[in-house]
Image (tube, helix red, strand yellow):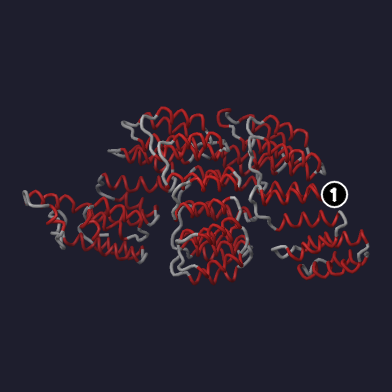
Amino acid sequence: MRFVSRRHGLDRARQSTDKSKSLHTAAAVLQVDQAKGAVEEEKEEQGDQDASTLDRIQHWRRPRNIPIWAIHCCKAMSANAETDHPHEIRAAFDRSKPRTLVTWNTLLTIYSQSSDLSRATQVFDAMPGRSSASWKELFLRYAQFGHINPSKELFDRMPGRDLVVWTSFLNLFARHGELNHSKELLFRMPQHDRVSWTTMLRGYAQCGQMLNAKQMFDSMEERSFFSWTDMVSGYARMEEFDNAKSLFDQMPSHDLITCTAIIPAIANYGKIGDIKFFYDSVPEKDLVLSTALVGAFVQIGNLVEARGVFETMATRNLVSWTTVVSGYAQYGFIDEAERMFSRMPEWNLVSWTAMIDGLMENGGLGPAKLLFDRMPQRNIVAYTALVTGFIRNAQLDLAKELFDRTPQWDLVIWASIAASYAQHGHVDHAMAIHQQMPARDVIVWNLLVAMLGQAGRMEDALKIQHQMPKWNVFTWNAILSGYAINGDIHSAQRSFDSIPEEIVNCQCWTSLMHAYARNGRVIEARAVLAAMPTRDLAAWNLMMETYAQTGRYKEAIHLFHEATLDGGVRIDLVSFITILSACSHLGKIQIARDQFVSMIADYGIVPIRDHYSCVVDALARSGRLCDAESLLETMPFVPESSAWASLLSACRVYRDKDRGARAAAQAMEVNPQASASYLLFSHC
């Protein structure tokens, strides 16, 4: 990094620092930054001498205003930062007397860039004097990690604020959906550039407020590639594909970067044909574009197409390999993920972590732990994957042991661990983690409210809500969801009516519908769906499931077809599980078969075990026992005992004793505790 700064300048060095994962590079940048003034003085002394001569000097003169002991101190702290020894870093700082602004800033930067914001804040508060770099370093780090309140406090106190600080603060509010604050801040800014306008536009687009985003876009005097891309991606995310394609066609030029950015947006909309058509229309293709296509197919769950594109790629990089491995692991194809992982020419943290997470998700605690121990380096994501995996598999002692010896945590990871405890029924553990958090922002508060609501502790959830400094739409949704889960219709309706009209979104309506559905109030739930200004897939799926769970299978099938016609909603694997189950109970084997084929061919969805089980049940109920048994034996998963039990039950109805014996034996092999299989077999 120091070599880069000397040969190519400080800006290039800073770019290298941004890409580096090592902590000591930050200290080196500070030293170079402080030395920059002295170098400029040297150039002035040289008069007309060619600046390139100075660039070739291998050893810079020590800056006149920085004592040699201060630079030695910075180097000592940097060396300890590289080996991740916080106590030695502080010891090196404490040994330096007297201390200068350089040593203080070096210590502050090392802590902040290692995500240790608690220590960084302590250093900042203890500094006898601060430079603009001190203020900016701590502020930008708080903003990066989404800490709104500390960032706001620092912003208000900061003596000098440049455009970078203003834009970072604007981006912080926009990322968290605080668009009113973002807009107010935008108009307070002393000056604007394309970045600030694009940041505001991106906030609107990410929150689905495409009308406001389009107004902002139209008012921009200068549009960057990013502003065009944000608009197209926003339209695609809201499933306004015609608008997305129209705007894409209006772009001044299309390069590989633009096309690569748009492919995931098209995939989010939907179908294999759309993705292939767009990819084929790009005149020149490179590795990045092909990798984006692989990622798009993984995104919609079509691993067959993803693998096909991957195998035809002339060259592959670490990203393309990792995308395929992550896809297989994400969808539960662990054996194939392991085969691809072993074929990789090299591994990075993402590929290691994807395998660990996939193994833990599928109950492979032992192999996941062995893989974790083999990792040459571990980051916070790998630790989180293992801890949450232990929680998911009820290994709370192992989870706590690993959590306690993890080197560093940031606020996002704290929240993830707490959420994992809560999702698996360990609310008290989640509360304890929440209390230990070094800081809390609105996201963390909302997470706690949601955790308590889902656990049925609505009284505690309401207490926490009233302790919050402010509420947003996610707070209201957490309360609504809690009432819905607990079946409290009246409180849910009262809470819904209290939400400010300007922030009511589709999730609020869906939570209200859920409250009615949980209490069997199907007519009222359907009325809520009809009254929604816009409907997303979650709303359609919830209503379909409600019909299916109450035995109204014809209504579920009718609603499925209605959903496919409503603004091009992209049906997902949950929708197909519901429709296949409904077909099974109605004995509509041909419709079930057609939908199963359509799911693969038209929607590019890779069937999971539940889809196969629904088809097996449909075949068995209609008396096609041979076909049902054949599918159970050839499906790409180990069938669950319930699938074999479906066949066994049908064998009892159709008096097929031999096949029933085989089904009973298979059910007992998968689940030896399934004594009901023997009971069913005894009545064949």
Q: Quadrant of the N terminus?
A: bottom left
The foreground one among 428 and 189 is 189
Q: Residue placed at 54% from the left, 72% from the top?
A: 370
Residue 26, position in %: x, y? 30, 56
Q: Quadrant of the C terminus?
A: bottom right
448 displayed left or right of 624: left
540 displayed left or right of 591: left
Residue 305, position in %: x, y? 59, 55
The foreground one among 238 and 164 is 238
Q: What number of labels is visible?
A: 1
Residue 547 lies, with reference to residue 77, above or below; the image says: above
Give the residue number, with chain letter if any, for mark 1: 587
Q: Quadrant of residue 155?
A: top left
Residue 77, position in %: x, y? 29, 62
81 displayed left or right of 358: left
Residue 347, position in %: x, y? 46, 66
Q: Quadrant of residue 338?
A: bottom right
The foreground one among 316 and 201 is 316
Q: Residue placed at 11% from the left, 50% from the top?
A: 41
Task: Give the SS element for disc 1.
Answer: loop
Q: Mark 1: which amino acid?
A: Gly
125 displayed left or right of 428: left
